[in-house]
Amino acid sequence: MCEPTAIATAASGIASAVGSQAAAEQGASARNRAKLKNHERNNQQYLTDVMLNNAIWKNDVQIADVQFDQTYMSMIDQWVQQDKQLDKIFSAGHYKIEKSIRKMYENDYAGTMTGNTAARLASKSVKDMGFETAETLHGLMFDEEEAMLKQDITKGEADRKQWDIYDKIRFQPIHGHAPPPPIMEAPPSRAGMFLQMGASVVGGMATAGVFKAPNVFSGASEGVTKAGSKMFTDPTLMSGFVPSSTGSSVLPLQSYSGLA
């Protein structure tokens, strides 16, 4: 095969090796770029989630502050209502005591009469007024204690509501770690390309016959052929054959000098 064909064969193999290596490196680079792009998008989504979670938590804190005030004002309103009810009870008790006092003075005529009967009648109205006053005051004391107990219960309920509200916003949102960077793909080794290029060059050289061994016996075989033809055509050489014990003709050793 001619040398241009061998060169073209080697060049084609080298170009194929270079092209395959370039395609593999470009593929690895494209995959790495895709990983970096996804990582960038994940980081952007992470930052967006952090911003939204912080905004939601801050809004919840403001709402909790409003709920604190509403709970406190609700407790105050219940206290005021209970105080008004207690005032109403005390007012009714005062009127009842006042009524018993008026009744006592209306029935008091001890000044117009003398004797045991007058004293007994006068003391009876005072005793009745004292009994009614004691009963009224006793009821007022129980009503006051009941109102204070209700206020304590109302305060406890308000405290528990405020604690529940605070428990929802006392911790800031935990965002966790940012997305880790991707593991990049290493570019393919060029050793295979160089081996393939070397194989292509060696193949081209083999195609050109560089590694073909020369025929070292081509000249010697030609000389032997010429000597043989001379031997059989020259009668002086043929006359030197002597028969051997085996029946074949053997040429004497000194006759071989003419073959050179």
Image: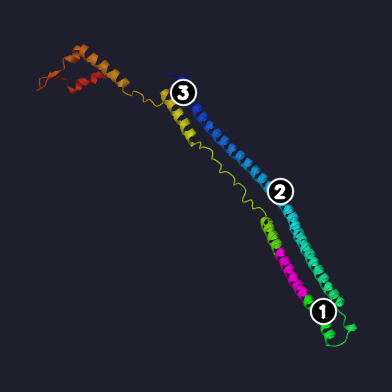
Residue 203 circle label: none
User: Can you identify the residue that label 3 sits on?
Assistant: 9
Image point 71% across, 48% down: which residue?
A: 55
Q: Main secondary structure of the magenta part?
A: helix
User: Can you identify the residue that label 2 sits on?
Assistant: 55
Q: Does the magenta-highlighted stretch encompass residue 95? A: no
Image point 87% across, 77% down: which residue?
A: 105
What's the amino acid at mark 1? Ser
Q: Earlier in the sequence, mark 3 or mark 2?
A: 3
What's the amino acid at mark 3? Thr
| Residue 24 locus on image (x, y percent) | 52, 33
Region rendered in magenta: 134-155
Q: Nearer the viewer, residue 177 or 83?
A: 83
Q: Secondary structure at mark 3?
A: helix
| Residue 49 locus on image (x, y percent) | 66, 46
Image point 56% across, 36% down: which residue?
A: 31
